[in-house]
Image (cartoon, rainbow, N blue to C red):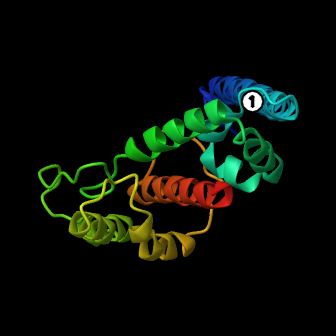
């Protein structure tokens, strides 16, 4: 009887063992990175809440994450109290105006419409760019500025209210829909903050 043995059998087994160990190392590395990120996020959240409790950096905290600002009632109440101080109120309003004016999305969601940036405007029947176009048409007809057109906000706000807040914060690569959601969330939060403080 002749037994035929695969001469590369042992080599195959060695390679599988090496691959298994490499996979295990990679899995452990990923778990460590995730644990480290979770720890950093938790520390960041605690630090942010401590600052709010101590009335520190309220304006910066609010405009660094407008959705958090809109949803975190304690921060809104602290800001409401601080806006009794004229200097604080002026700084807050300036930051609100800067943040609102510096959002650039599509052809119309910007301080001045830019109809050359895309082949078709509003972009690809995008619902946010369409809503911004209607708002731009309104402010243009009333000779207002993009950041001061409260009388043109009702339809815009009604559209934004149909978009729920997203938990998405940061992405390495974002889809067009994710960018639209983040931009809509920012506008929605800014308008809500403005309404709560006025």
Q: Residues within 10 Å of mark 1 (few under 14, many from 20)?
A: few
In the rendered image, residue 136, in percent from the top left (x then y), is placed at 28, 64
Residue 45 in view in this figure: yes
Query: Which SS class for mark 1?
Result: helix
Q: Quadrant of the N terminus?
A: top right
Judge by depth and name the residue closer to the eye, 32 or 164. Answer: 164
In the rendered image, residue 141, in percent from the top left (x then y), is placed at 22, 69
Image quadrant where residue 54 sits: top right
Image quadrant where residue 143 sits: bottom left
Q: Is residue 53 left or right of residue 146?
A: right
67 versus 53 height, above or below:
below
98 versus 152 height, above or below:
above
Q: Quadrant of the C terminus?
A: bottom right
Q: Residue at x 52, y 36 (%)?
A: 95
Q: Residue at x 54, y 76 (%)?
A: 162
Judge by depth and name the residue closer to the eye, 170 or 99. Answer: 99
Q: Residue at x 38, y 66 (%)?
A: 128
Q: Residue at x 33, y 56 (%)?
A: 109
Residue 171 in view in this figure: no
Q: Is residue 159 left or right of residue 64?
A: left
In the rendered image, residue 131, in percent from the top left (x then y), is placed at 36, 70
In the rendered image, residue 45, in percent from the top left (x then y), is placed at 80, 35
Q: Is residue 72 left or right of residue 129?
A: right
11 versus 166 height, above or below:
above
Which residue is the site of mark 1? 37
């Amino acid at each position: 009887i002749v037994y035929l043995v695969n001469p590369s059998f042992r080599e195959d087994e060695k390679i599988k063992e090496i691959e298994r160990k490499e996979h295990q190392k990679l899995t452990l590395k990923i778990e460590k990175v995730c644990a480290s990120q979770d720890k950093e996020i938790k520390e960041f959240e605690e630090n942010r809440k401590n600052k709010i409790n101590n009335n520190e950096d309220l304006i910066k905290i609010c405009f660094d994450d407008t959705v958090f600002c809109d949803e975190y009632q304690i921060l809104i109440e602290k800001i409401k109290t601080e806006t009794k101080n004229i200097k604080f109120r002026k700084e807050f309003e300036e930051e609100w105006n800067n943040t609102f004016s510096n959002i650039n999305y599509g052809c119309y969601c910007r301080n001045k419409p830019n109809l050359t940036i895309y082949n078709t405007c509003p972009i690809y029947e995008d619902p946010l760019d369409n809503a911004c176009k209607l708002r731009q048409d309104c402010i243009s007809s009333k000779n207002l500025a993009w950041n001061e057109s409260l009388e043109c906000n009702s339809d815009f706000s009604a559209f934004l209210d149909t978009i729920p807040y997203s938990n998405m914060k940061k992405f390495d690569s974002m889809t067009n829909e994710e960018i639209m959601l983040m931009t809509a969330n920012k506008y929605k939060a800014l308008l809500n903050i403005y309404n709560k403080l006025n």
